[in-house]
Image (cartoon, rainbow, N blue to C red):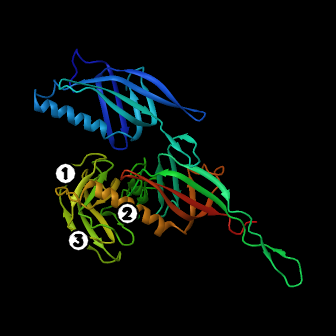
Amino acid sequence: MPASKMDGLRSWKFTSGADVVEMDATDFWVDHQGEVSGEDLIPKIMLNEVWEHSDFSEDEGRPRRKYVEDRVAQLRDMLNKQGTLVIDEGETEEETYLSITLIAFSPRQPGNDLLEYDLEFGYPTASTGAGVGGVQLPARVEFGGENDADLLIIDSKNMVLELGDDGDKTEFKEIFRAAPMRVQGAVPLKIINVLGIVDKNVPSAWAVYADTNDGVDYRANRLLDPNGSKYWRSTNTALPHWVKLYRGTFPLFKPASVGIVPKTVLNAPKDFTIEGSNDDIAWTPILTVTSASGWVTLEEKLFDITSNNYLYIRIVATALMGGGNQMDLQTVNLHPYSSTVVSDYFSNNHGKRLRVEDRLRMLNWLQKGRQRELRINDDALLGSMQVTAHLRDVQIDDIEGLEAPAYKLTFVYGYGVG
């Protein structure tokens, strides 16, 4: 929005993943508040009386009203998202708040010419499962090896660890003409309950493979973690390069489009094919794209396919936008709707619901019962000691909207240890 002598000198910007909402050349005053939860003081930050004009960019009447309505919708859609708040960016007084959540948006002025509102940010409290509140802090669970294509990566708004064991396994046996004697049973297992998980990354595939990767931080399984800072990047070797999605047992929907999110525009695919397979051996071309355009960094671009319910879907690139050989992607999504057809059933929300259902089914069918490496908060669990555990139980706690399933996981380890 163009600045003028009527505008203020302050700015704010809130970033959550690829979503950004901001305001320059405005004014507001900051109020630091707090809520007491148990013995903790939960900090809150209020941006009071933020204002912005609509009269510089839109004509009077309906266009101006539509501008205000769209701006309100944009702010509303950022509610309950966790991200980074920057106040007065680039100035000496710049302040940055990490892992903070937009809690409330309160319009003050409903008129067409001036939109005025309050923004409330904070660190919401969350139940630990025992009736005790705690600050929501980012947490991470990784189940599986770094090289595994089906590495389970859970980025959570919050989680609580409960460590214990499953009790004494000694049994008593009745012996003829003798007192009962103690017989050692199974060794007690050590239990890790991960409670109150609110899953922020819900991919649309169970596993991801690629022809090459450029090192540990650029493996294909990073495409399963769209909210993470890492991504997939091929080696700088001759094309073609490809990524392949494994959709899991009995995929719930027939994808009508493939959504590709480029890490950089120059390394996005220009000429490529989308192929399908049910056995990972014979591949059938679904769509051929030549001279793709319109890529935007970290923004999803949809490519329609015709209801193909293949178990595997592969993207094979033969040319990149910048003419190089090193391809990189932030993530790849499958959707049950196309770029042009969105109905009550084949909708964005329906796609989110299917992904949540697939995520929970994947935990139960693919991960439950497996013994794998377990890393919680980058190996911070148990003093950075490597733990090999198996996932014993998966239970639904709640569904927060359609993007963030909430559940608890029970891991056990300690087999054969006295």
Q: In the drawing, does residue 385 fall left or right of residue 292?
A: right
User: Which image quadrant is residue 45 in?
Assistant: top left
Q: Which residue is mark 2?
A: 205
Label 3: how many Cα within 10 Å (few below 14, some 14–19, many 20+):
few
On the question of residue 136 being in view, the answer is no
Label 2: how many Cα within 10 Å (few below 14, some 14–19, many 20+):
many
* Picture layout, residue 349 above or below residue 16: below
Q: Secondary structure at mark 3?
A: strand
Q: Secondary structure at mark 1?
A: loop
Q: Which residue is mark 3?
A: 285
The disc, 3 or 1, on the residue closer to the chain's N-terminal end is: 3
Mark 1 → mark 2, Cα distance in angstroms: 26 Å
Residue 274 picture location, percent across and down = 25, 65
Q: Are marks 3 and 1 in contact (CB under 8 Å)?
A: no
Label 3 vs label 2, nearer the camera: 2
On the question of residue 23 being in view, the answer is yes
* Camera-nearest residue between 336 and 36: 36
Under mark 3, the amino acid is Pro
Residue 256 picture location, percent across and down = 23, 63
Numbered mark located on residue 304 in the image: none
Label 1 vs label 2, nearer the camera: 2
